[in-house]
Structure formats: structure tokens, C-alpha cells
Image (spheres, rainbow, N blue to C red):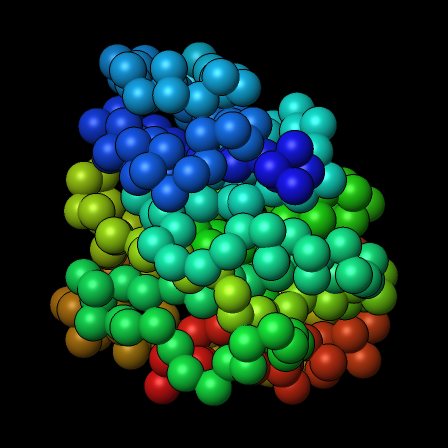
Amino acid sequence: MHHHLTISIATKDRSEVVDATLRKLHAFGLSKCALIICDDGSSPPFESSALELFPQAKLIRNDSPQGQAIGRNQIAETCETPYLLQLDDDSYPVVGDIEELLVFAESRNDWLALAIPFEEPARGRSFPHGISKGSACEVRAFVGCSTLIHVENFRKVGGYADWIGRTGEEEELSLRGIEQGLCCLMIDGLRIRHEVTDVGRDLAAIQRRSITNWTRIWIRSAPISYCILRLARLFFGSTLLGFRNRKLQPILAYWRAVLSLENWSARSVLKLKSIQTFNKKPHVLDFFN
């Protein structure tokens, strides 16, 4: 069933990291799958000798950075298979059966993403517990480094929001999926290791993006009473983070998003029932606790 699957990797300025990942994917037996890499404005441009291991490899190059979410949208638009194995540029399967996962994927058509259990040794996360092998549980959202995407349903929902960039894009997509009757599931059978390589990572920037994007998400998507509630919580959280780190950036990130006329004018309100359904489900990361 490898002809049903394309591997998706969006990357920027991490050629050596991607090269190592591709060799691990080859060693796992996935070199017969289609592979699409989006080089999102890397300088110098992405190069890897390991591409030769994948006869069906395609490379998308953006002259300037468009953001990880846009890169993944470009991959989905180019994809010619029913499913995308979406990985980070430093995540890869270590155990399990891809065929088994695809058999389950074909058994139903009401899902947007299948979250795949993963480990992050660098963050002290081992494979999560409480996931039944062979059966799926519904989750609020998936994690971008380890998921199977239903390409047709992904396109139906509209893909990742073009304004979000990265951080929170999976949750925002899942919210719109619920509105259209599509769920996210988590199932055991394949397992992914995410190295969380520190090349090009900025934890402070990730925190700021999280504040900015969640503020944007609720402004653009939530009924006004619920929006005000969530903005109050984000105000408290960003202020606390700013004082704790003795930096203004988290507070400024919040207020820039709140005061953006673009966010308020782009409101496309979801049903409160959809948001409540989203909130009731566990997040993939809850299984690590």
C-alpha cells in the first residue's frame, strides 16, 4: 500500500537535519513512498544527497519564507496520493507497521488526521500510555511532527490557515474540521521519534507565536462572549510570562494581536457547539501526563 502514501517534510535552514532524517526513513523501508519536501526559503538552498534514496522525491522551493503551515499546504496541493505522512524535518518512524496504519485509514472516511504516538527524548517524553492498539480514540488535535493526513478532507477544510505560520496551526485546523463533521483520531500501530533538534529553534519565539496565534484564533473564530473569556485568560497568561521572564515580548505579542484590525475584520465565527466539542476532547499531549 506504499503507493497510497506520500511523506511530507517542510523545512528551512536545516539541510543536515533533513539529510539525517531521510536516511532514517530509508532504513525504515519507506524509500518506495512518494516524498515531497518544501524548502521554505532556506539560505543557502536545501541540498541533500539522501534525496537519491527516494526515486519519487519532489522538491518545492520558496524563494522567501512563507511559513511552515503554507509549506505543508503546498505539499498537500502537490500530493497525488490519498494520505500524507506529515513529519517534522527531525522526526521519523522507529517501530510499527505502516501498512497496518493505512488499512485502518481506509476503513473510514470521517477523519481529518490520525495522530501517531511519538516520543521526544530531548524533552523527556517517552511513548504515551493508554492508547489501545488497533482501535482509535478521538483527540482534540494532533501534533505536526507525527500524523497521517487525509488529503481529500484536508483540502475540503481548506488546509492550514494562511495567516497562522506555525504554532497552533493544528488546533485551528482541527476546529474547522469539527465544524464540518470531521474528527481527529489517535491510534497505535506506528511510532515516531521526534529528535527536537536545536538547530534553528528559538524557544522564546515559540512562546511568542503561541500567544499571538491563540489570540488570533479566538478573535477570528469564537462567538464574542467566548472570545472575551479566552482573551482575558490569554492576557493573564502573557502578562505572567512576561513578568516571570522579565521581558515585554510576550505582553507585546498579545496586544499586537488584540489591536490588529485585520484579525477582527477577518472574523468567521464557528458554532459554540463545535468549540465545546473541541474543548471536551483530550489533546494528544495529554497522554504524556
In percent of width and height, residue 214 lies at: 52, 63
Specify the quadrant that holds the C terminus: bottom left
Closer to us: 228 or 66: 66
Report which quarter residue 162 is drawn in. top right
Viewed as shown, does residue 175 lie left or right of 27? Answer: right
| The residue positioned farthest toward the left in the image shown | 246
Residue at screen point 46% across, 37% down: 30
Give above or below for 21 relative to 259: above
Q: Would you say residue 264 is visible in this rendering?
A: no
Give above or below for 205 relative to 288: above
Give above or below for 212 relative to 152: below
Viewed as shown, does residue 260 lie left or right of 152? Answer: left
Closer to us: 211 or 189: 189
Number of marks in picture:
0
Specify the quadrant that holds the N terminus: top right
Residue at screen point 22% across, 38% down: 200
In percent of width and height, residue 243 lies at: 21, 74
Residue at screen point 79% across, 61% down: 107
Report which quarter residue 225 is drawn in. bottom right
Q: Would you say residue 281 is visible in this rendering?
A: yes
Residue at screen point 70% across, 49% down: 150
Give above or below for 238 relative to 69: below
Closer to us: 85 or 173: 85
Report which quarter residue 231 is drawn in. bottom right
In percent of width and height, residue 206 lies at: 32, 54
In percent of width and height, residue 4 lies at: 68, 38
